[in-house]
Structure formats: structure tokens, C-alpha cells
Image (spheres, coloured by chain):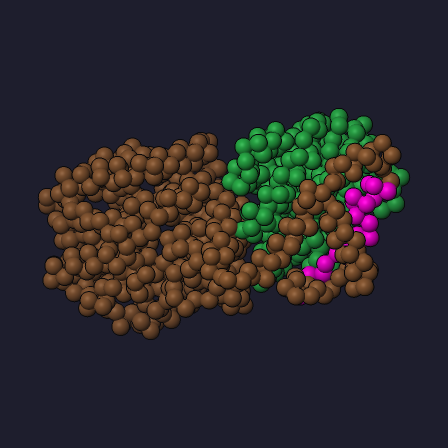
Amino acid sequence: MRIALFITCFNDTMFPSTGRAVTELLERLGHTVEFPQGQTCCGQMHFNTGYRREALPMVRRFTEVFAGYDAVVTPSGSCAGMVRDHHRAVAARYGDDGLTEAVEQVVPMVYELSELLVDVLGVTDVGAYFPHRVTYHPTCHSLRMLRVGDRPLRLLRAVRGIDLVELPAAESCCGFGGTFALKNADVSNAMLADKVRHVLDTGSEFLTAGDNSCLTHIGGGLSRLRTGVGTLHLAEILASTEGDAQ
Amino acid sequence: MSGADNVVWLGTPAFPEAARGALADTRLRANLRRATGTIRDKRLAVAAELEDWEELRETAAAIKRHTLRHLDHHLLRLEKAVTAAGGTVHWAADAAEANRIVTGLVEATGEGEVVKVKSMATQEIGLNEALAEAGIRAYETDLAELIVQLGGDRPSHILVPAIHRGRSEIREIFRRQMGQWGRPAPEGLTDDPRDLAEAARLHLREKFLRAKVAVSGANFAAADTGTVVVVESEGNGRMCLTLPETLITVMGIEKVLPSFADLDVFLQLLPRSSTGERMNPYTSLWTGVTEGDGPQDFHLVLLDNGRTATLADEVGRQALNCIRCSACLNVCPVYERTGGHAYGSVYPGPIGAVLTPQLVGVENAASLPFASTLCGACYDACPVKINIPEVLAHLRAEAVEAGRRDRLLPTTEALAMKAAAAVLSSPKRLATAQRIAALGARLVARDGRIGFLPGPLARWSATRDAPAPARESMRAWWRRTRTTRRDESRTTAEGKEAR
């Protein structure tokens, strides 16, 4: 399968390791990964902060760049959710009929990583090896926008050597919410404190999730408190093999 | 907006500031955690009992959508049916008009006091204050509303307005205040919930037996029969609805249902979503006036107060589906931590954050649409499927637009967003920004972590470390390791600037 990787602007800049992991993983499973260099951003930050008009060029670019692939994969639940739930609305409101039509073509091809693996490629055991104690945080948008359900957990359970521990109150938001973390920093912190407490309660070495933005938030708290608990994107665990020295 | 209007409380700071105080209130945090946690689990358990829960939600949303689309028609049907059954219907465009109508009706009876059934609509219009100005005393009879009224307080939850109070606080309020309003609290009152309920029972009983006029809200009204419905837990509402001679009901126009049969759907959804009960203890239904049974004079005041304007908004109108169950408050991670007062409105929580700005104009409650992480827990819990995150994001855009209209110069945020949009819509500019960020990070990062960020980003770094931008971005890595000469031309074409 010819799969285009939409890395997302945030991962591109901050977490290229996640993009490399997705590439390695999909190639290991026998697929061709392409990275269109014209890609930038899904427009989520602008859309969710009230700057919808500004999101239009990003929607347009995404639609042009990712047209024509068998599938588009992104290692971010919230960016996949933005494309799936809101690109149509931006195109219809601020774009033109041509763009709206093009968006309709591309949107059904866009998958979050766990969706692509389980639903499209039909695998849960990706041959990974990760001998560590890990807990999984289901991010809000993957859970309640995309409805990925237990797909990420099924993928994790099949990882060899992993000691997967359930996170208490897992489905509670970590308090990130994009610009919410700045606009309502105090409430955001109150939510983060509980999430950090729950992560620590599991005694895990690593916290994983399908979105580096949430992981940056929780990880920022874990790091500030010098807990020693690491954060790692789901893709990086799934890409790990016996040969890796983690 | 009239001074008595309570949709937004004048003088309340914007949400982030109001929330700061609430977050530091240890007792409030403990009360909220306990109360929302308990009700959350109960709701999940009883909703799971119904196999057709999702279909019920879907049906309820469809009924509401249909009703709102033909609201004028159904309201006229309701007026006709209520009138035919011996009631009188009044139309109020705003809070001031509704207050004038109710005050006039009470004055016409010659009475100086009324008993009240718990009602959001009368809270919204500030009826108690308006009646007080006319020398009429309004007694709240819902236990939690009584606690709020005696405490000189404001409601902080739609269903449980005194959710911010613990039982020892309630005992103090009863001991100090009951005597000012009527029968004092019994000697030696403890903070045992049974004792507190008994004190309220004794205090309220004399009011029920004396009252000649009652004021209520309405959960539903069936347009075909003219039947009005009040759903409650304590029986105090039933007292008010049956004992007095005159009953005045103030109802938001969106509460009408096309048919009595529609109650089948809503009476399954409401109690399970609100109190986590299969059925609420008291459901009172009345159709106009019945000779020799209950109030002989019935008035229904239909309240607009911003609802028609809300209806005009294609995205925002779904907020009018709300049946005031408060499930969204109980599941909201923000509400759970701040409580209701921080929202500065009679309608707090997620539904308040979408309803209040629409009722009063987004420029008058501009911080509320941003008082959410858009986590979506509210949408999942909503029995009438209001897509609250969708409306929140929509209202954020409205708030930004309103800000643009009101200013000559753009805000710092608007400028930053514009700059970000320029970078993020061009791969070339993004790549340049990534190189600059990586260079900058080398100066400030330690062990790949940044502990201090400048400007507004300091609000992040005050409590959280930030990762350093990668030395080599994904696109740079791909270009270095994966691009062959043949791909290069393709890549360049794709990467070509639009402008």
C-alpha cells in the first residue's frame, strides 16, 4: 500500500522521532511510505482558537498535498479529528465548491495510526518488543472524536516484553486543550496534577499515547517534578524491536 | 439588559480569573469532587441499563430539532390548548417584560408573598429580585435553592444549586438565617443530613400552608394537550403546584414539545441523566385548571429572552435542545474543579458556556467559550446530543470576530495567530522557522528540556517543562536520508510556494 505520512507541524518540529518510527513500522509491515514535502499543518490551532478564516490556506494545502494516496496516516488523534470533523466546514464556509469537493475526496483516506493499523492493514501484532512497564493515556480526541476505542491497547497488548498497566481515570482530560493550557493555565494545571498523580500511581517507566501534544503536556509536568517517568508516542513503542537498545 | 437579569452576573471577572479563586478553595474542591464523582457513576450505571439509550438520545435530539424548526407553530398550538383548558398565556420578549407580567399577576391577587418551585427560567430573569422591588417576598422551596437563598448566595449548579456547600456550612446557614425568613432552625441542630432535611421541612411547611400564590418553571409543555410538566425529587414542588390558589409558570419558549406522547422519550432520559435515577420521585402534570382540584387560576408566561436570536444561529441553536439535566456539568473536568460560580452566570458548566454567550451576546461573555479543553465528555453525556465542543469552537470564532469589530488595532493574540498562519501555510517558511527554533533551543535547553519560556508562553513553563525543538525536523531528515534525485524534482514541485 502506498501510504502518505502526515507528520503534523508539531511532530515535524518537536518529535521527528515519531515520524521516523511510523515510517519504520509501516515499512517493516511491507508498505511504501511517502512524505510529501509540501505538507504543513491541519489548521487545528487556528480553528479551535476562533481564527477559522486563517485555517483556510492550511486546509487547502492539506487537501492538495494529500490527494491521490491509498491512505494518509497521521500519528495524532486530534489532527486526524480536525481533518475528519472540520475540514469540510472550513472549506464550505471560507473556500469554494472546488475545494469542498476535493476535501470530500481526501478526508475518508485519512487515518490516525491505530486506525490504519487495525482497520485498514488488519494487524494488531506488529512484531514489536518493548520490555518496560508502560501505561496508556487515551487522548480525548482519539477517544471521543475518532472513537478509536481499544485499538491502541490491542496493539500494545501484542507487544512482546511489555508490562502494560491500566491508568486510573484514564479517560479524563489531561488539561492540555491547545491554547486552553495558556488561556486557562490554572484550570489546566489542576487537571494536569490529577493526571500526573494517576500516572505515578501506576509505577510505570513510560506513559504512552497516540498524540504527542497531550504527552508534551503531561510529560512537561512529569519532567518538572523530576518524576523520572518518560513519555513516548505509541508509534515509537510499536516500532521498537528486539534489536533496539531502549 | 435589565438590572435584575441574572443570565450573567455583573461584576464577575472573566473565567480564568474567577476560576483561580475557586481552584484555591479547598472546601469547594472537596465538595465538588465528591458530589460530581458520585452522580457521574450513578448516571453511567442507569444509562447502561437501557439497551436503547443511544436511540433514545437520537430520538430526543430529532424531536427537539423538529420542534425548534417549527417553534412558532407549536407555541401557538400550546397557547390554544392551555387557553382552552382554562389557563391564560402571556408572552414575554425579555426578562423585564416577564418580571412585569409576573409582578402584575401577583399584585392582582393582593398577596405579598409567593412560594417557588425550583426554576432556571425565573433564576435567569432575576424574578425574586424584581418581586422584592415590588414588596413581594419570594420563598424558594427546593431544598438546595433554600440553602442558596438563606445563604444570600448564588446557585453554582443547574440541578444542585448548593453543590458548593458542605453539610456543616448548611447547618450554619440554617441556624443563622432561618429565623430571618420564618420558622427558625430547631435547637441543637446537627449536620446530619436527616436533621437538616427535617429543619427544612418544618421551615417550609408553614409557607406551603399559608401560600396563596406559587411560581414555577416548567420542564416540558405538550402543545397538543396544553399539559405542563414539572419533574422534581422532593415533593416540595408538588406542594407549590397543588396547594395555592394561583399558579404562575414561567417557561422558556424552547421547552414546548409537539405532543404529550413525546414525554415518553424525555421522561426516560431526564432523570437518568440528571440525578442518576430510573425515575424521579415526583412528576407533576397539569392541564389548565381543574375545578375543585389545585390552583383555580393558572398563568403560563412564555419567555424569549434571547432564545429567538439563538435560534437564528445554525450551529448554536442546538443549545436550545437542553433539558437542564446538568449531566454535562457533572462530567466536565473543568466544572469539576472550578464549580459553577466561576462561569459568572446562572447557567454554568459546558451548557452555560454555550448558552450564556448566545443569550446575552458573545461580547458580554467572551471568556466562556474558551473555558473548555474541548475534551468532548459533555457531548457524550448529553441526553439530547448537543455537540457542545462544536458550538464552543463556533462561539470562539464569534468572539474573535466580535473582538475584531470592536478594535482599531488587532490584539497580540490576533497578530501571533496571523504570523503563525503565514508560517504554517508555507512549507518553506515552516522549514525556516524550524531551523531557527532548533538553533534557539540549543541556547536555552538543558538535557533536551526547556524550563523557562518568554512572554505568554511563560504560563506554560511556570509549571511544565517544554521539550526542545528537534535539531533536525522530520522534513529535513526525510530530505537528507530518503530523497533520491528523481524524488527531488517532485518534492520541489510540491514544496513550491503558493505565493
Q: Is residue A126 left or right of residue A190?
A: right
Residue B470 lies in the magenta stretch: yes
State the residue at coordinates (47%, 57%).
B405
Q: Is residue B177 left or right of residue B405?
A: left
Chain letter corresponding to the colour brown: B
Picture layout, residue A128 above or below residue B240: above
Of residues A58 and B22, the one drawn nearer to the viewer in this rendering: A58
x and y, in percent, of residue B123 in the image:
32, 58
- Residue A237 in view here: no
Quadrant occupied by the N terminus of chain B: bottom left
- Residue A55 in view here: yes
x and y, in percent, of residue B101 in the image:
19, 56
Picture layout, residue A246 above or below residue A4: below
Chain A colour is green
Q: How many marks?
A: 0
Q: Is residue B220 left or right of residue B159?
A: left
x and y, in percent, of residue A52 in the image:
55, 47
State the residue at coordinates (31%, 44%).
B255
Q: Is residue B377 left or right of residue A8?
A: left
Of residues B110 and A10, the one drawn nearer to the viewer in this rendering: A10
**Magenta-colored span:** B462-480
